[in-house]
Amino acid sequence: MLVALGILVLFDAYVSDRIKIKIVEVRGLRLLKKGDVVDVLKSLHKKWIFMLQFCNVEQRLKSRYGFLHVDVRAVWPDRVIVDVKEPHPVYILVRGRKRWIVVSNFYVYPYRKGMGLGGLPLLYFGGLKDVNSKRLPIRLMKVIDGYVNGLRRIGFKVRKVEVVGVAKVVYYTKRGLRFVSDTTKRNIWKLRYVVAIMRKRSKNPASVIDLRFGNSIVVR
């Protein structure tokens, strides 16, 4: 009994502190900084390195930040390396004077000046109560993404998207034409007819194309 107690005392005095995690290195961050993910990583500090649960850390980082890939590995005796792959940015979310980055799986990241993302469409989300939530409504964002990509395929680059209330989305294109949709996917097929409509209206260009109404396309 005394021998076992002595071993525990020696372990705590000479060994345990040497194998506790002291350094956490994060690699692969481009949009985020280490300080942005510290709330997850701080739980690693001072734990014994051989007790590190890699799967738990990986799942927490994926769930909280939407990383596409996370790899956590221990470097004996007191260092952990975390490799991550971020989604690519697709929109700049705007509310008042504040901005955030929306990435491809619709997670929201902090925005910092000088990030060089000026070419992304601006997203004005009027019905969103909590901008600081970690992810935007997936169903609606898939609808918006479908229209933005569909318009790009027929030659209209979207510079701004405005969600108006709960049932209306307006897409402002760089060519000055506005498209209006509802918040479902059922009318996205109408985009295939837009080019033909624009040709017919070449002498009297449209300013708004409304795709919300049944099988019709309203041109104004």
Image (cartoon, grey):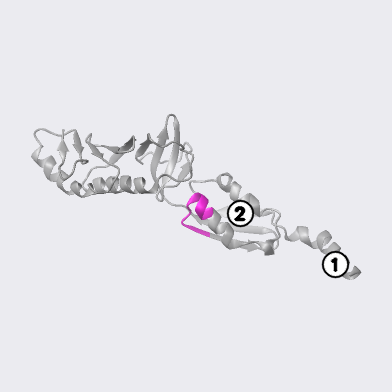
Does any portion of residue 28 appear in the rendered image? no
How far apart are the two marked residues, 2 and 1, measured between alpha carbons?
32 Å
Q: Secondary structure at mark 2?
A: strand
Task: Please report the bounds of the magenta region as a residue range.
Answer: 61-70
Residue at the far top in the pictured view: 96
Does any portion of residue 123 appear in the rendered image? yes
Residue named by callout 2: 25
Rendered position, 194 above or below 47 = above
Residue at the far right in the pictured view: 2
Q: Secondary structure at mark 1?
A: helix
Left or right, residue 216 beside residue 132:
left
Q: Amino acid at mark 1?
A: Ile
Please give the name of the residue rendered at 68% of the width and 61% of the height, measured from the top-left corner: 49
Question: Which mark sits nearer the N-terminus, 2 or 1?
Answer: 1
For residue 7, the mark is 1
Q: Where's residue 101, x and y in %?
A: 43, 42
- Magenta stretch containing residue 177, yes or no? no
